[in-house]
Amino acid sequence: MKGLGHVVALCGGVGGAKLAFGLTKILPVDQLTIIVNTGDDFEHLGLHVSPDIDTVVYTLAGLSDRERGWGLAGETWGFMSALRRLGGDAWFNLGDHDLAMHVERTRRLTAGESLSAITGALARALGVTANIAPMSDDPVRTIVVTDDAELGFQRYFVGEQCRPVASAIRFQGAGEARLSEAARAALTRPDLEAVILCPSNPYLSIDPILAVPGVREALARTDAAIVAVSPIIGGEALKGPAAKLMRELGAEPGVLAVADHYRGLIGALVIDDADAADAAALAARGVVPLVTGSVMITDADRARLAAETLELARTLRK
């Protein structure tokens, strides 16, 4: 895209993957790095599962299940049926085809390869050429603190269906984690011109990335335009517990709360037409608003929103 140097997208799962897909349709491969949250990663049945990475890879490969919103299209569940018959630990679904990703990732990790190298290899095997960088090759685990227990993210999200009331969120291991080399290189490039915070959950998908030492520091030093796309539309999240978490953590769900959460970090926020009435309040906070249709149903929606977001970043750089 003319007028921009390198672009970095900070990305979580479903919503972030959709925008990342759009970005890959309008930017050359060497102009984009997608830094993906790994705070959702966990070990299950002896396998290393990377839900956000896999969602991004499957989406960019055109293999994701658009109706369910996660996993592979055309998935089958024979493994899970057999596991349940055996009385196994079946609270987290692993599809028959998706299982191959986790088995191969775990095999390579055990052999000493880094998560970054493995992610690149598996993405290329599925025809994905985009630069996908795990935020860290070191373990970082998102922990949701509730009144009754501290729950790993997948136990909270899948096992408990987000029912427990959250009082805090912490990122175990973040303080000791190192930025992956690809993420560090992208965030410190001299030609970095735009950082896009994808419409992923601010608390559960973007905050873990920001918690890795070096990320906020790099963003504070850069002259790049930093633009977020709101995952909240009309006071609710299209998918996931973002609005519920906002309420439980003391914020009124809406685009103003998103802007306040990213206070001092972003220069602009893309919001949906449904939230146009909040544009003036965003501007009063020093955040440039872009009001547009932000629901991404079709591939054309994804590419259009990506183009509009990049154009906003370009105008901020003038």
Image (tube, rainbow, N blue to C red):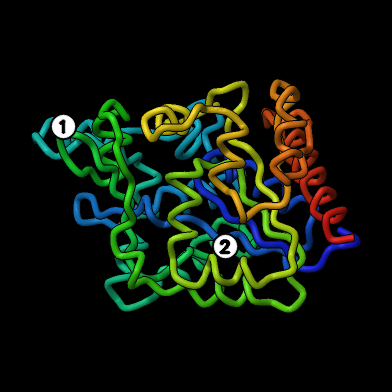
Q: Residue at x 31, y 56 (%)?
A: 141
Percent of width and height locating residue 298: 71, 30
Q: Is residue 219 above or below residue 126?
A: below
Q: Residues within 10 Å of mark 2 (few under 14, many from 20)?
A: many
Q: Is residue 134 visible?
A: yes
Residue 84 is labelled as 1
**Which is more N-terminal, label 2 or label 1?**
1
Quick check: marks 1 and 2 in contact, CB under 8 Å?
no
Left of 281 or right of it: where is 209? left
Q: Is residue 61 visible?
A: no
* Element carrying mark 2: strand
Residue type beneath disc 2: Ile
Residue type beneath disc 1: Arg
Percent of width and height locating residue 300: 78, 35
Residue 132 is labelled as 2
Residue 176 is labelled as none
Viewer-nearest of discs 1 and 2: 2
Left of 68 or right of it: where is 170? left
Q: Residue at x 85, y 49 (%)?
A: 311
> In which quadrant will I find the C terminus?
bottom right
| Residue 138 location, quadrant | bottom left
Percent of width and height locating residue 258: 57, 38
Q: CA distance from mark 1 to mark 2?
A: 34 Å
- Judge by depth and name the residue closer to the eye, 18 or 167: 167
Q: Residue at x 69, y 42 (%)?
A: 285
* Element carrying mark 1: helix
Percent of width and height locating residue 77: 32, 33
- Judge by depth and name the residue closer to the eye, 3 or 147: 147
Q: Residue at x 81, y 43 (%)?
A: 308
